[in-house]
Amino acid sequence: MQVEIVELENRSPNEKKKLGTYGFIKGASQFVIGITRKSKYVKEEFGYIFEKLILDFSKHGFGTCWLGGTFNRANYAKTVNIEDNEHILCLSPIGIPADSRRLADKLIRRAIKAKNRKKWDALFFEDSFSNPLTEIYAGKYAIPLEMVRLAPSAGNKQPWRILKEKDKNIFHFYWIIGKNMNYNKLHKVDMGIAVCHFDLTVKELGLKGNWKIKHDIPLKIEEYKYVITWEG
Ligand SMILES: Cc1cc2nc3c(=O)[nH]c(=O)nc-3n(C[C@H](O)[C@H](O)[C@H](O)COP(=O)(O)O)c2cc1C
C-alpha cells in the first residue's frame, strides 16, 4: 500500500468541484489518499496503517474523516501516481475542524447514528457468541476492548465481534456480515482499525501478546468471518 498527500489549494474551482466529496466535506484542501493493490489481507493491513496515521494527525490537532464511499474515485485517481493494478481504497481530508457541525452533517450523523456505539453485550463474548463478556470479567483487557468499541467503522456498522477463550487471555477477532453490501466491502478495513486500537492499547498498557492467524478457525459460523487472534 501507499499513501499520498494531495494539496488542492492551487487547483481551479472546477477541478476542486470534481474532486468533491458530494458535500460531505467542505473547505478541506489537503487530503491523505490510501492506494492499494489487490492481495490477501490488504484491506485489513490498510485499516491498521491508515488508522495509525489518522490517530497521529488527530494527536496534532488536525480534523480527519475516513471516507470509503462518498468521493469520486476516478477523479481522485487523476491526482495521484497510480498504476493500472492499483486503486484508491479510502482517503481522509486533513484540516482544521470547524467549530460547529453543518446541518447536512448533523442530519447524516443522525441517520447513521454516528454518535452511538453498540453495547458490550453485542460485541464481546466468551466461548460462544451467545455468552456476552462483561467489562468486569474482561479485567485488564476491558480498556483495549473499549477502544475497539469506540473505533470508527464504515456507516458506523461496528461489525467487530470478539470471542475470548474461557480462562485464557486469548481473543479471536471476527466480523459479522450485514445486509448492506457497500458496507460489507469495507468491513475488512474496519477490522484493521479495530486491531489497531486493540494493539496500540495493549502495548500502551504493557500487556504482552502476539497476533496469529489461525488455520483451524476457533469457532466456525456462517455469518461470522474470522480474521485474527491475539494471544496474551
Ligand atoms: C472504512 C470507513 C469508511 C468510511 N466511509 C465514509 C464515507 O464514505 N463517508 C462518510 O461521510 N463517512 C465515512 N466514514 C465515517 C463513519 O461514518 C464514522 O466513522 C462513523 O459514523 C462513526 O462516527 P465517528 O467516527 O464520528 O464516531 C467511514 C468510516 C470508516 C471506518
Image (cartoon, grey):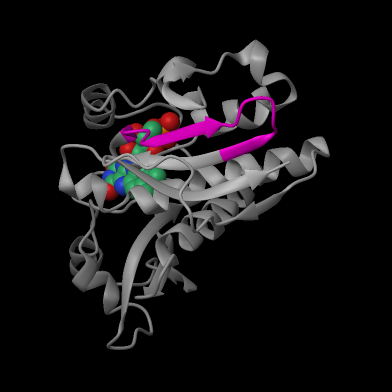
Q: Is residue 183 magenta?
A: no
Q: Quadrant of ligand 1?
A: top left
Residue 69 point in image, percent of width and height: 24, 52
Residue drawn 49% across the image and 52% down it: 192
Residue 45 point in image, percent of width and height: 50, 62
Instruction: Locate residue 215 relative to residue 109 in the image: left or right.
Output: right
Residue 67 point in image, percent of width and height: 33, 51
Image quadrant assignment for residue 213: bottom right
Closest to the observer: 31 or 98? Answer: 31
Residue 12 point in image, percent of width and height: 26, 71
Q: What is the count of numbered marks? A: 0
Residue drawn 65% across the image and 20% down it: 138
Residue drawn 59% across the image and 51% down it: 57
- Visible in this render: residue 23? no
- Visible in this render: residue 10? yes
In the rendered structure, which segment of residues is drawn in magenta?
156-171
